[in-house]
C-alpha cells in the first residue's frame, strides 16, 4: 500500500497543486462558485459539517487566484457550467455525483443515497442540469458569457499598476 500511496502522490503533485510527494488529506475537493449566493448556502452548510475534519477541500473558482493547473486543468469556463469535484487520485466527478460524494464525506450520505438508483439518479441529474443551466438568471447574475468576458478582461489587465509608477 505504501508504494501505491507514493505513486499516487507523485502522479498528483502537479495536477492537484500539492508539493511533490504529498498525498491529499481530503476525500473530495469541491470546486464552487463563490459569487453564487445559493451555492454559498450549500458551501457554508458543508463547511460547518466538515469543520475540524478536513474531509472536503473547498476551492472557490470565482477567486482571482483560482488556478486550473492546481485543479486537474479545469478551466473557469468549464467549472462554471456545472459543479465539479476532484478526488485524491485526480478523478474528476460532476453533477449529482459531486453532491453524493460531499454529503458522504460529512456523514449525510443518506440524503443522496437514493440517487444511486439509476432511474432516480437520471432524474436528479436532469433536475440539477436544469438548475445549472439557469442558475445565473435565478440568482440575478449576468449571463455566463458576460462573466467570462469580464474575467478575461481582468486577467488581461496588468494588476500591479504601482510598480510602473
Image (cartoon, rainbow, N blue to C red):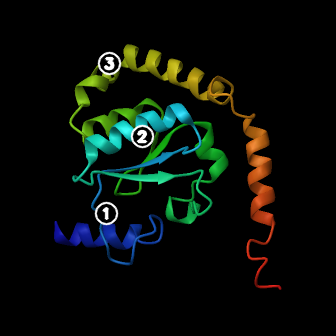
- Report x, y in % for residue 51: 26, 49
Q: Which residue is mark 3?
A: 117
Q: Earlier in the sequence, mark 3 or mark 2?
A: 2
Q: Residue at x 32, y 18 (%)?
A: 117
Mark found first going from the N terminus, 1 or 2: 1
Q: Residue 44's mark? A: none
Q: Residues within 10 Å of mark 1 (few under 14, many from 20)?
A: many
Q: Position of residue 9 (x, y in %)?
A: 33, 70
Q: Nearer the viewer, residue 134 or 34?
A: 34
Q: Secondary structure at mark 1?
A: loop
Mark pair 1, 2: CA separation: 20 Å
Which residue is drawn at the image coordinates 58% and 45% (left, top)? 79
User: Which of 20/157 is in front?
Assistant: 157
Identify the element where label 3 is drawn: loop
Q: Nearer the viewer, mark 3 or mark 2?
A: 2
Residue underneath mark 1: 24
The residue at the point 57 percent across, 63 percent down is 67
Frontmost residue, 19 versus 6: 19
Residue lying furthest left? 1
- Residue beneath the point at 32% across and 66% down: 8
Secondary structure at numbered mark 2: helix
Q: CA distance from mark 3 to mark 2?
A: 25 Å
Q: Quadrant of residue 78?
A: top right
Left/right of residue 24 with respect to residue 110 in the rendered view: right
Q: Name the front one of labels 1 and 2.
A: 2
Q: Nearer the viewer, mark 3 or mark 1?
A: 1
Compared to 89, does 15 lie above or below?
below
Q: Which residue is mark 2?
A: 43
Q: Earlier in the sequence, mark 3 or mark 1?
A: 1
Q: Where, by quadrant of the figure, is residue 18 drawn? A: bottom left
- Mark 2 closeness class: few <14, some 14–19, many ≥20 residues within 10 Å: many
Amino acid at each position: 500500500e505504501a508504494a501505491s500511496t507514493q505513486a499516487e502522490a507523485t502522479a498528483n503533485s502537479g495536477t492537484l497543486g500539492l508539493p511533490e510527494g504529498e498525498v491529499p488529506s481530503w476525500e473530495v475537493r469541491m470546486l464552487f462558485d463563490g459569487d453564487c449566493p445559493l451555492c454559498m448556502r450549500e458551501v457554508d452548510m458543508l463547511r460547518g459539517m466538515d469543520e475540524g475534519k478536513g474531509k472536503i477541500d473547498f476551492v472557490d473558482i470565482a477567486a482571482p487566484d483560482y488556478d486550473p493547473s492546481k485543479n486537474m486543468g479545469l478551466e473557469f469556463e468549464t467549472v462554471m457550467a456545472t459543479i465539479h469535484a476532484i478526488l485524491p487520485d485526480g478523478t474528476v466527478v460532476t453533477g449529482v455525483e459531486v453532491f453524493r460524494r460531499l454529503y458522504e464525506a460529512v456523514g449525510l450520505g443518506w440524503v443522496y443515497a437514493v440517487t444511486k438508483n439509476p432511474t432516480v439518479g437520471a432524474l436528479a441529474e436532469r433536475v440539477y442540469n436544469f438548475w445549472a443551466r439557469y442558475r445565473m438568471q435565478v440568482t440575478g447574475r449576468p449571463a455566463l458569457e458576460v462573466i467570462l468576458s469580464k474575467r478575461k478582461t481582468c486577467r488581461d489587465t496588468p494588476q500591479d499598476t504601482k510598480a510602473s509608477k
